[in-house]
Image (cartoon, rainbow, N blue to C red):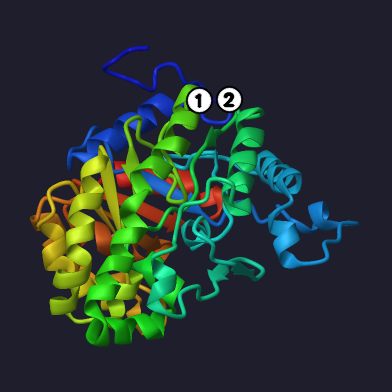
Amino acid sequence: MNNNKPWSHLELETKPDFGKCIERIYAWYNQELIDRPPIRFSAHNAEYNAATILEGRNWPTLKERWFDAEYQIELFLHELKHQKFLAETFPCYWPNLGPEVYSAFYGSELIYQEVTAYSAPLIKDWTQAEKLTFNINSEYYLKLEQLTELALAQCKGKFLVGYTDLHPGTDCAAAWRDPQEFCLDLILNPDEAKKLIDISYRDFFEIFDRFDKKLKQHGQPSITWMSIPSFGKMHIPSCDFSAMISPEQFNEFILPGHIAEVKHFDHNIYHLDGKGVAKHIDRLLEIKEINAIQWVQGMGDDTPIMQWEPLIKKIQKAGKSIIIDLQVSELEAFISTFDKKGVYLCIAADYDIQPDIIKRVEKW
């Protein structure tokens, strides 16, 4: 393996320009630029229809459909056949049992819906918190291992395999306790709340490293739901719960965990989910280990993107890279307003116009 280019061993028939794309991403991590900013396209081929995979299949519950590992891999492979991967759009399978699956490693029961799952509250009184233990034999942990192994057995030369969405910290503690209850706990039971947050971090590095080791043994990068690879260790710290609390509470309860959390990783991309979380941006920008901010502006009145010009420029001025979701109609205004260094564009666009978008960004 070339130590200067740790991705040199990895070739994908679905992504022949993989090496060049990774070079752009590594430049982006460092607020640098090779030729153009990275671009990820969404809204893939409209002809893909998951209904063809669902025909003749039935599951007694939604959970059993989520847990049908063979079906999940088959669905991904079916989708893979109907996609093209232009610019920094990567063929990536990551095992997904819902965004709160980390809490389930300790005993939470996940309630499944069509496209997501949420955790049923686990901690009714504080004596239960003392008994929380990472269970390596949890059905959720074992199922993620199975999904990972099935994908790794079929990925060579075709697609990347990532790790699941891992959320320790306050989001996990709130899932165990119930978010509304946990809001009250910060005021009425602050010491117990801090202990619960600490418990959520206790095994996090070990759990991450277990998944990371398995992927690295198969030559895979560190990658998850955001589909941005690193050949070190890449993490997406976040705290959606922080939208509900004050900056003073953020500094007291959440910031210490974030500062410790990110030190374990080579690349950190902070998931800044909406204006409620963005009120804490100044403190987040002070954390030197955070390479980039994913800005998720929301829907409705929170669009279009250009209303967030001051926030975006603040992030850039602080020396952080940024991920931006753009509509095609917003591209020209965005290009004419912002510095291209450290920008990663995520654009919903049909295949037929993606090459033209790439050419336009190349002229930026």
- Looking at the picture, which amino acid does disc 2 mark? Glu
Q: Are marks 1 and 2 in contact (CB under 8 Å)?
A: yes
Query: Residue 11: x, y in percent?
Result: 50, 21
Callout 1: few (<14), some (14-19), or many (20+) C-alpha neighbours within 10 Å?
Answer: few
Q: In the image, is residue 96 above or below residue 284?
A: above
Check residue 152 in the rendering and tell me which mark sits there, or answer none: none
Residue for point 21% across, 37% down: 33
Residue receiving disc 2: 13
Residue for point 31% across, 29% down: 23
Query: Residue 261: x, y in percent?
Result: 25, 51
Element type where label 2 sits in the image? loop
On the question of residue 321 being in view, the answer is: no
Residue most toward the top?
1
Residue receiving disc 1: 16
- Looking at the picture, which amino acid does disc 1 mark? Pro
Element type where label 1 sits in the image? loop
Residue for point 40% across, 79% down: 179
- Depth check: give the residue in front, 16 or 165: 165
